[in-house]
Image (tube, rainbow, N blue to C red):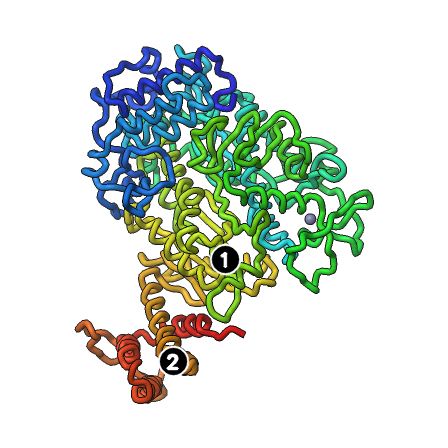
Amino acid sequence: MEGGRDVNQETALQLMDYGRVLMKRVAGGEKTDDPTWVKAYLDLLNPNRPAAPPTEPLQVIFTLVNVQGQTVAPAYLRPVPLDLSAEQGASDWVLMPADRPTATAADRTTLYRSFAQEGGKAGQDFTRFFYLMRKYASTLPNDYGEPGVSLFEQWKIVAALVVISGDLAWPPEKLGLVGGDIPGIQRTINLVTSKGAAKAMRGRSAFIQLLGHALVERLLDELGLGSANVVYDAGGNFVLLTNWDGTLKQRVRDVANQVNRVLLVGTGEGQERFDGFHGDLAVALDTVELPLDALRADLPPVTLPNGDQASRWQLAEKKVKDAVAAAKARPFGDLALESEQGWHDLFDLEPAETDDFCAVCRRQRRRDEKFVPLDPDAPVDVAIRSNLQCPECAGFGELARSLGHRGARLLLSDEPPEKLSAWQRGLHAVTGRWYRIGEADEKGAVTLALNLAGFPAPGVDGFRLLARTTPMTGRTITPNEVLADASRGGLKRLGVLRMDVDNLGNLLVHGLPQRTPMQTAELSQALEWFFAGWLGRICDRVDEGRGLFYVLFAGGDDLFVIGPWDRMPELAWAIREEFRCYTADHAMIHLSAGIAVVGEKAPMVTAVEQSHEALEDAKKLNRNTPREKNAITFLGRSYHWKEFGQVQAMQQGLVRLVKEQDLPGALLTTLLAIERRYRRDWEHDAKAQDAERKRGAWGAYTTSDGRSVQVYYGPWMWRQAYALARLKDSYRDARQGLEQLEAALLDGRIADLGLAARWAQWLTRKER
Ligand SMILES: [Zn+2]
């Protein structure tokens, strides 16, 4: 049973009954009593619980965040099933924050009826019931009185504690945490050359996500726990709640060693052999004891010796994270120490170099191995002579392709699939289960929908969100060349977008001073719904359903998307706008983005590195000031979002001048020259000590909207005025557009020309 392995059916039924009682009371509006055993468990969360059921809606967790006194007004969730649909008659996602009257007025009984109809009322299958609760109770408030925590998380933590104790009558007296992390994602993705292209990267990142799932499943099996014991699991970074005894550390260490051996040296024989990652990927696990009062929602934070405040949960969580970080620093250390074989595995030499290697991962072929031809859609790259790929890379490509199909499901089975891929062999070695990506009507021993709409449905046990927006042409993945070719205008390039939440660690550490495991779970879930769920809808909207975006990875708090270069700023902007709404416009919760523009044949490694550097640059903007980060880097220039919007408007004005009013494209070249001159002189003057040698000077200027700003005047001003005046005479229809441009430049925005004119130039380049 996936939901609760070591719980007997009698206990499972009691837990389901408790879930029904909660739903009936909070959603159905009926008067119900808790089963008598529950009191002792709820006392662990909050002994001073409110007497009446909650009438307030569930407060959005982001609106509880308080960083250095920066807060927002509370916002709330409507009582709806977890879903990616839009509110009736609006384009708003139903999970977007609502004001209090809207969320309060919404009827909870509709939600209750759906829950009951889908089997919430009479169903006996604990796994399915677990996901029904997740689906229908995640937007309802709890009734033990903790802000920002859903009814689902309340039921989940009680279920987790029951699973730990194994006996309803006796809540656990000792608790432990297992922390886990899969490092090296970046590195593994980087092992892909141009011939593997996007598909190879996608396959690897999907594998790593599935490996995270497999590792959690393995630990739950090993420790006799259920899904309720997963406090959170965000992009390969997870925490499990378990009991604490003298054997826990060793048991968890044994799992880490077994899994790391598989990742280091591989497993299986022949064509479906999983060859491992040769030291480039390892998991890190460790454990700490969790004091019982770390669950308490009603205790004030602890004041630390340095004056900082932290909750009891935060202290324990930090301890387990530190332990995991230490384990990460010596990924194969434990393995080597474990046995003679460990040392052997670690220092086993790679086979001698031959001309014969995999075009994707560049691994040498062993004498007994059969490599398969590359896909016909792999880009031609003269630098790489091989046209063969290893079975493992072929398998990763297959995984990427099957994820791209609509309605795909994750199937877990005890029987091996007919045609076995290397990645399946690898995951089997980790969990003892066979993983498969199935079509919409296929079933496994456990069948999980990979999106929110796929559950509840007949034959589906639950769901697990996996971002899998894939550009498909029939049943194959659209190659990078075709994506690049879909760029509007003459310049055909691939855009690579990376985004992540700024200062997430800081938000978690300092933003919620009374943070409990329940609030932590809520925060992690909220981010997951956005990055692994809503992101797909944003992609569909921005490319108008034309399938131009390829999400190579999204989860936790970051994302990685490729597509036609000209669409990427639009996509980044839309994601940022949606995220801003989703987090109720909290000034301290924001994203940064980096966009790289590369040729469609550029090695993926280069694209990855450039987008990574662009994101780093965005994060360096106004570093160590209150305005740091919250920015985007595009074509080598970094801007805060609001200013980026202005630059984009300037770019659009320039494009109009060139395209609609037939101004010569040379205008853009002239503007770029002016900006270059401005930048050079400004930099020169900033260094020049001697006032005599300065080329320009600051002066006051009254802007179009009446503000007085300091503008840096210099020779470029004359060049600019001259260039624009001449155009105004020759192109009378364009007069208005040119005057707007002139006003913007006089308003001190010459520097924006660098990006705006370059961007416009690329967009208006003629098709060759
Ligand atoms: Zn390979």
Distance between mark 2 and mark 1 Cα atoms: 29 Å
Q: Residue at x 56, y 21 (%)?
A: 247
Amino acid carrying label 2: it is Asp
Residue 564, image x, y percentages: 49, 61
Residue 744, image x, y percentages: 28, 75
Confirm whether residue 432 shows in the render.
yes
For label 2, count other residues whose C-alpha is less than 10 Å away and answer few (under 14), some (14-19) or many (20+): few
Mark 1: C-beta under 8 Å from nearest atom of ligand 1: no
The quarter holding residue 93 reads: top left
The quarter holding residue 758 reads: bottom left
Asked if residue 229 is positioned above or below residue 654 in the image, the reply reads: above
**Front residue (pair 408, 518):** 408
Confirm whether residue 680 shows in the render.
no
Q: Residue furthest right?
A: 367
Q: Which numbered disc covers residue 563?
A: 1
Amino acid carrying label 1: it is Gly
For label 1, count other residues whose C-alpha is less than 10 Å away and answer few (under 14), some (14-19) or many (20+): many
Q: Residue at x 45, y 24 (%)?
A: 128
The residue wearing badge 2 is 662
The quarter holding residue 478 reads: bottom right
Badge 2 marks a residue whose secondary structure is loop
Q: Residue at x 35, y 51 (%)?
A: 590
**Front residue (pair 378, 43):** 378
Residue 9, image x, y percentages: 47, 13
From the viewer's perspective, is the residue at label 2 or at label 1 nearer? 2
Asked if residue 486 is positioned above or below residue 588 in the image, the reply reads: below
Q: Residue at x 49, y 55 (%)?
A: 548
Badge 1 marks a residue whose secondary structure is strand
